[in-house]
Amino acid sequence: MTTPDKAAGEAVPSAPVNFIRARVAEDTASGKYGGRVMTRFPPEPNGYLHLGHAKSICLNFGLSKEFGGVTNLRFDDTNPAKEEVEYVESIMRDVKWLGFDWEDRLYYASDYFERLYGFAVELIKKGKAYVDDQTAEEIRANRGTLKEPGRNSPYRDRSVEENLDLFARMRAGEYPDGARVLRAKIDMASPNVVLRDPAMYRIKHVHHHRTGDKWCIYPMYDFAHCFSDSIEGVTHSICTLEFENNRPLYDWFLEQAGVYRPQQIEFARLNLTHTVLSKRKLIQLVNEGITTGWDDPRMPTLSGVRRRGFTPEALRDFCERIGVARADSTVEYGLLEHCLREDLNERAPRAMAVLRPLKVVIENYPEGQVDEFDFPWHPEKDMGRRTVPFSKVLYIEQDDFREVPPKGFHRLYPGNEVRLRYAYYITCREVVKDEAGNIVELRCTYDPESKGGGTPDGRKVKGTLHWVSAAHAIDAEVRLYDLLFTKPNPGAEEDFTSCINPNSLEVLRAKLEPALAGAEPGWRCQFERLGYFCADEKDSKPGAPVFNRAATLKDTWGKIEKKQGGK
RNA sequence: UGGGGUGUUGCCAAGCGGUAAGGCGACGGGUUUUGGUCCCGUUAUUCGAGGGUUCGAAUCCUUCCACCCCAGCCA
């Protein structure tokens, strides 16, 4: 066979492409926008950022980085009734934490209120906007339905002068909320309902978190967003699919005003199994006290997953892997966990913690003796070492002992020998129970020859257990988190709170190796054989650590046992 | 016959007329002082369905079906 003809320079692994990158590359190559690339991340400060936002942030900032452009952070703060500074602060904190930098380009739509007002006046002068005195109900009734056209407002043909006067008086505060509204004059019969004379300004005598009481009329999203993009010189205005119907309006406003027009491009928003990603639902979880707040480690908010122990690296990798497309899709939660494990497997120190302690007494180990072992923080990477004491009385995991071992169980059971990680081989000799028949202690013997975890005769043991010295262990609270919902698509339920997982949090009093005592809040490690944990950023104190489980390790044995119909 | 979108393996997702990438998952095997990691292998004769064009179609045409978005003075 002949070698296939390979073009020069091929076989270069190309960066993952998606239709947006391809489009920006096209525009850059063709010189559209002068080869410039400017994107923006435009959150409304009415809630905390979540994983869906992470996708958008990574997309927008990733795009500008790839094409040598910039990304602005712009708060879309046009509805003071819902917006708060707490949210703008959390948003900035989260974007930074995710690893992105807007440098000096921090903008607020509210900074453009005066210019926006000017554009509105211009549209009025061009006969493209009018003040409508109808009530909200009347406007709705006259909008028609999806299949029937709407009817023109009786105020639609007011003179430019009257419109100008009325609009100025709206701004001046002469009318109460809802009395009048400024509308674009487009087409009440448009098959696209968005174009049936959409509202541009509404009256709201509400204090704004930045402009205070300067304004009592506030622009609507469709009107404010396109002009904000235009003012900043954004080239590619990326948003989610549900705004596709609004694109003609986005274009219309800018064309009527005769100003620079960015290109809006829509992509499918992120959906994740076993969670909800809508602000309305998230805020409900917070308000109803179902979770402890926006940063509860079970929340899919960035502050929640951060507190849980996720890393920005894992999140960015996740956003890279899920891709960007236009088809509605739901990513499995398992992919998120995979990304965390992959990142932390490399970077997290290892430590030993016993979550559900079972006392083990080594009968032939000298009373009062202590082995001060020197263990590496990581089995492969050089991350330094720590001292771990070993003594006559230890704790092992209750799960690691079975009086009657199921098939395939190679942990500890009567007569069986296992390795205590890095320490000694021990053999179970006797099971001690209380009157009720509960196992309260194991009497074992150890092989002094096996120090370090291996023996001169090279005999193998199948199991290796983590352990902690009873006299030296520190007590600590450990929080075991699981999925917040029991169903893959809680949003599809009549009431999504009906499938809240009652076991999404289990609080344990665990025994930790002493080196963990000084863990700084936010510090992450792997508890060997258990999972990745993070010292809680709020409740953990050096000397009194509190650990959150971010993710378990993959559990092959657990899977086998489950198949066997085991516990 | 309201308009706008989308349908490729269990879940994401490439592909853009030349004979189905990749990731996650699953399954099997090897290594292993974490039943972890790592390594190797398997996992769509088929691209929502039917018809057509073509030497050749997931890619073009056509009919049909399913799902998503839009009737806030929310974004």
Image (cartoon, coloured by chain):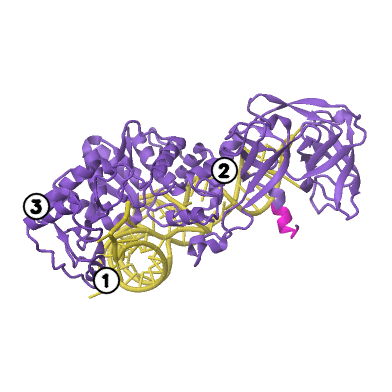
Q: Position of residue A483 (x, y in %)?
A: 58, 53
- Chain containing mark 1: A
Q: CA distance from mark 1 to mark 3?
A: 30 Å
Q: Position of residue A399 (x, y in %)?
A: 77, 48
Q: Colour of chain B?
A: yellow
Residue A453: x and y, percent?
80, 31
Residue A362 lies, with reference to residue A401, above or below; the image says: above
Q: Amino acid at mark 3?
A: Lys
Residue kind at label 2, given as amino acid type = Arg
Res A11 quadrant in image = top left
Range covered by the magenta-colored residues? A559-566
State the residue in front, B68 or A16: B68
Q: In the image, what residue occupies the spot 9% across and 62% down?
A: A158
User: In the image, is A342 to the left or to the right of A190?
Assistant: right
Question: Which residue is pictured at 89% across the width and 51% down the height?
Answer: A434
Sequence-earlier tag: 2 or 1: 1
Q: Chain of mark 2?
A: A
Read off the residue under disc 3.
Answer: A125
Image-quadrant location for residue A359: top right
Which disc, if any, is residue A308?
2
Same-chain check, marks 2 and 1: yes
Of the residues under marks 1 and 3, which one precedes in the sequence? 3
Q: Which chain is purple?
A: A
Q: Is residue A554 magenta?
A: no
Q: How many angstroms separate mark 3 from mark 2 (CA)?
A: 55 Å
* Secondary structure category for the residue under label 2: helix
In the drawing, what numbered circle is on residue A145? 1
Residue A546 place in picture, x, y as percent: 64, 39
Q: Residues within 10 Å of mark 3 (few under 14, many from 20)?
A: some
